[in-house]
Image: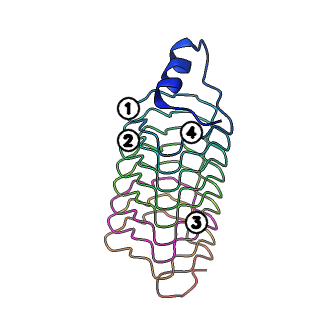
Amino acid sequence: MKLSREQLQQRLAGNQGPLWLNNADLSGLNLSGMDMAQARLLRANLSQADLSHANLSSADLTYASLSGANLSGANLSGANLSGADMRTANLSEANLAGADLSRANLAEANLSQADLSQTNLSESNLEHANLQGANLRESNLSEAGLGRANLSGANLSQARLREANLQGANLDQADLTGADLEFTTMPDGTVEN
């Protein structure tokens, strides 16, 4: 089901509860600044969509396609993005605090300056992702793939990186205070015990 921005706005205006758009095709649309808090967008196609500064807090985007989407400055706090395809997405300065990004594909995504505190990123693919200056405090990165990721200046304090792959990653000035690095493959290829 392909929707236009106008049709989506009409649905939002007439809706008493959260928006239900499972499997909807919203690819390429300009949805910047829209309030879609608590929307159910399971398996929705939002690839190449402009969602900059949109409110998607507590939204369910399980297995959604957000590849190449612009989510800069968006509010995704508490959202469920488990298994989502977010390759090359722009999430710079986005609020993802407390979100579930487990098993998500974030390869080559821009997460610079994003708030990922207390976020579940377990088993996610963050290969070549830009996490420069991101807040990952108390996040779960267990078994995550962070090969060649840019984590310079990132806050990883109290983060769980157990069995994560950081081979070739840039950790310059990253804060790893209290981080769980057990069995983590470090940038130089050594494994922490």
Point out the tag, 3 or 2, that comes first from the N-terminus: 2
Looking at the image, do the residues carrying marks 1 and 2 touch, with CB atoms under 8 Å apart? yes
Q: Residue at x 60, y 45 (%)?
A: 45
Residue 180 drawn at (x, y percent): 56, 66
Residue 28 drawn at (x, y percent): 47, 45
Q: Is residue 128 above or below residue 71?
A: below
Q: Residue at x 52, y 48 (%)?
A: 118
Q: Main secondary structure of the magenta part?
A: loop
Q: Amino acid at mark 1?
A: Gly
Q: Point out the stretch of residues depicted in magenta.
A: 126-153
Q: Is residue 175 above or below residue 167?
A: above
| Mark nearer the viewer, 2 or 4 | 2
Q: Nearer the viewer, residue 151 or 118?
A: 151
Q: Nearer the viewer, residue 132 or 63?
A: 63
Identify the residue under disc 4: 79
SS for dot 3: loop
Q: Amino acid at mark 3?
A: Asn
Dot 3 alpha-carbon crowd within 10 angstroms: few under 14, some 14 to 19, many 20 or more: many
Q: Nearer the viewer, residue 138 or 67?
A: 67
Q: Residue at x 38, y 32 (%)?
A: 33
Examine the image and state in which quarter residue 78 appears. Answer: top right
Which of the numbered marks, if any, corresponds to residue 139?
A: none
Task: State yes or no: residue 133 in magenta.
Answer: yes
Quadrant where the N terminus is found in the figure: top right
Which of the numbered marks, if any, corresponds to residue 125?
A: 3
Dot 4 alpha-carbon crowd within 10 angstroms: few under 14, some 14 to 19, many 20 or more: many
| Mark nearer the viewer, 1 or 3 | 1
State the CA–CA distance, disc 1 to disc 3.
28 Å
Point out the tag, 4 or 1, that comes first from the N-terminus: 1
Which of the numbered marks, if any, corresponds to residue 33?
A: 1
Q: Amino acid at mark 2?
A: Ser
Point out the tag, 2 or 4, that comes first from the N-terminus: 2
